[in-house]
Image: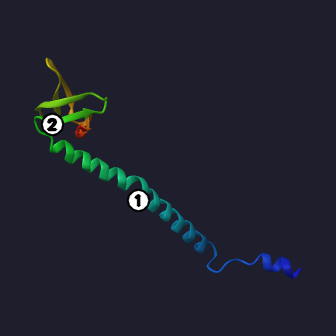
Amino acid sequence: MIDIAYAQQTTPGGPAGAFFVQLIFLIGIFAIFYFLMIRPQQKARKRHQEFLANLKKGDKVITSGGIWGTVVEIGDETVTLKVDANTRITFTKEAIASYQPKKEEKPEKD
């Protein structure tokens, strides 16, 4: 009989203590999501906005669709790329993904 009595004892603080434990757990989960998912996305979005703001004529870029070209005209919301001798395509600025990688010249062996 005594064992049953001990099993039925409540924890100090009662239901309010359990509520605070759950609240702390939820705050911890939100903090993990913030630092592992939300904050890195915000930083990447900010870097991309700075990249788009610094675009200038003559930059060699790649679009999100994989088209390589040279910037020939920049508008408020659009960028025109020269992709071939007589071919120019206009994109929204957000479609520009990155700069083209620079070719590293290898020294020729004698």
- Residue tagged 1: 35
Q: Decide: is 85 above or below 1.
A: above
The mark nearer the N terminus, 1 or 2, is: 1
Q: Where residue 73 appears, x then y in whole percent?
A: 10, 30
Q: What amino acid is at disc 2?
A: Asp
Element at badge 2?
loop
Give neighbour class at mark 2: few <14, some 14-19, many 20+ (Cα, 10 Å).
Answer: some
Residue 47 to residue 58: above or below: below
Residue that extends furthest to the top in the rendered view of this protein: 86
Label number found at residue 65: none
Q: Residue at x 60, y 70 (%)?
A: 18
Q: From mark 1 to mark 2, how far is it between C-alphas?
A: 34 Å
Side of 17 relative to 6 (left or right): left
Q: Nearer the viewer, residue 18 or 80?
A: 80
What coloring was used for the rendering?
rainbow
Q: Secondary structure at mark 1?
A: helix
Where does the N terminus fall, quadrant-wise?
bottom right
